[in-house]
Image (spheres, grey):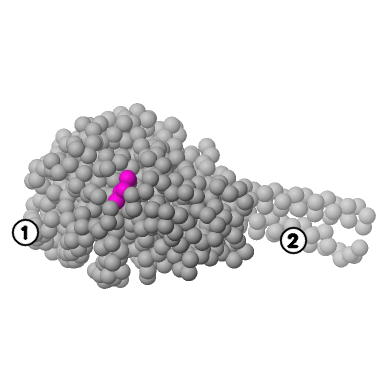
Amino acid sequence: MSTHPNFDKICVAVLIVSLLITVLFMNASALGVENAERVMGYEDTLFDTSKVHTINIVIDDWDEFLETATSEEYTVCSVIIDNEAVRNVAIRGKGNTSLSSVATMGSSRYSFKIEFDQYDGGKSYHGLDKLCLNNLIQDNTYMKDYLTYRMMDEFGADAPLCSYAWVTVNGEDWGLYLAVEAVEDSFMQRVYGGSGDLYKPDSMSFGGGGPGNGKNFNMDDFMEEFGEDMGMPWKRRSDTENTQETAEPQKADEQTETLTPPSADEMGTGFQMPPSSSRPKMPGGMGMGSSDVKLKYTDDDPDSYSNIFNNAKTGVTYADKIRLIRSLKQLSEGTGLEDVLDMDEVLRYFVVHNFTVNSDSYTGSMIHNYYLHEADGRLAMIPWDYNLAFGSFQGSADATDAVNDPIDDPLSATADDRPMWGWIVNSEEYLEQYHELFAEFLDSVDIIGMIDETREMIAPYVEKDPTAFCTYEEFEQGVDTLRSFCSLRIDSIRGQLDGAIPSTDDGQSADSSALIAASNLNLSDLGSMNNGGGFGGGPGGDRPGRSGSEGQNGFPGGGSGFPSPGGGGSFSSPDNSNFSPPDDSSFSPSENSSFSSPESGSSFSPPGNGGFPGMSGGNSSVSRDAWLLLGASVLTLMVGLVIVWRFRRYA
């Protein structure tokens, strides 16, 4: 037994210090300590942007899967990514309007979502839990999404990773897709270290809430209700700002009817945007979304924000909801913004976002296609779905208006109606920061070089794409138009930053003499919402100029289905000939793993570490592990105090 006269005091001090350190670690982010980004492993494998990757989908009956793809039901399959196999994963059709559009067009080139952890919660591909394969509909350039995500990433804004993938099905060519990191668990781990909550606010019934939501969209109903307003992405606000009406706040589920999405015939080439001179902005910048998807504070009732909370991507508690509402209140009031915003991230997001002139977004009339991250009350924006960006929301729009879209008055957004944007223009200090970052973006990100490099990389794959929505000539024209648009957009923004061109709607309405002329550009060349078959971008599985026959569902070879993969490295193709997976006729799964057919029930270890560093169930601001740590510290302190008391008793 120690006889030091202050032994008991020393023990108490050590225990108290330990407890304080525990509390500090639990609340580090609230004290300004940033969560460290986590290196997952898939960043440098599948999302290496220097090459086109290969993804072979091995599935029992492809035709049957395609017939039910619009239901967004999961089907078991295996995938071989760059000759590395992952067995027993889930695949389903995905998309908002694109699912119904592809089906209406008579194509089978759906977008897909691959979920590595659907049947085994610990399975991943080098840490990636879910992968989106985008079909590049409405994008003759093949790169509107890709270019935006790359610009976001290079400029330091939080964004999903992406790369190109040549997709085959049971070894048969299917087409060039864009592989995109799903904004879910693995994204949260990589970018935020697993902390915080994630939402995809949406009131348009476009599928933001999860599988199956997009299939309920009916375009006929949509155009009947909103058709006149859809042709207003570029506006002159002064024409309508005096007609604004003030409405009483409503619950989110009362603000916007659930839409039940137009037919391709209705949305075909006959649907034209009105000329720019007759295209006023929607009154008051209201757009089509509810107050909650605009991130406006209404009241303290969580039910008023159902379009946010019903579209949560992480588990949220009542306390999480109240914390987010408090942040929205401060955001709407413009108070304590440093406490409720990741300011640098949001500023960088809007710099790149406003460059792209994307009407199908938070700043457009649709008011969706973004994710919202919240951690300890601080909010950040995450980009999503830019296939209608670069002025191509309606291809018949005036390119001059799009090229010169004012950076301080973007699209349909007004400061009072879109508070996540409004805080920037409502403050001279923040507006100056925004302008400085815009200049930095134009100087540091080689946009034109990125377009040229991407074109060179993907052109051979586009030329042979058997299910493409456009011809190769249309691709070439689309890329030329995108390159010209971005070059002119850069010139316009530089002029707006130095004052030579007005950076607001009112300024451009008063004096349009300095605007960059772009009337020679046809934005329909980029691929647009009314290009080809309504929301579709072209013929899909019936591309002209292709040799050989295409069978049912546009699949090369004319087969009606695929048998399950057999042993070894060979499969039976529709014409009963044998073909082999890429590279040396063998799969080459990860070390210590074995590949078997999808219907087999045996276990399989995925590539990489074989497991996903999962997130806690609630994802509240203080995680369950943190509370356990606090409880253990308190228990340790209590035990220490009891020991000290006993020492004092026998001393």
Q: Looking at the rendered structure, which numbered label has been put on residue 513?
A: 1
* Residue 59 in sight: yes
Tell which residue pokes out farthest to the right in this image.
Answer: 650
Circle 2 packing at 10 Å, graded few (<14), some (14-19), many (20+), is few
Out of 184 and 512, give the one closest to the viewer.
Answer: 184
Residue positioned 83% across, 50% down in the render:
642
Query: Can you give x and y, in whole percent of width and height, for residue 173 in the image?
Result: 36, 58
Which residue type carries mark 2?
A: Val
Res 582 quadrant in image: bottom left
Q: Nearer the viewer, mark 2 or mark 1?
A: 1
Residue 24 vs residue 296: left or right?
A: right
Please, what secondary structure does the residue beneath circle 2 have?
helix
Query: Can you give x and y, in whole percent of width and height, for residue 334 in the image?
Result: 35, 47
Residue positioned 33% across, 53% down in the render:
556
Query: Can you give x and y, in whole percent of width and height, for residue 542 in the image?
Result: 25, 50
Residues drawn in magenta: 550-554
Distance Cα–Cα, label 2 vs label 1: 73 Å
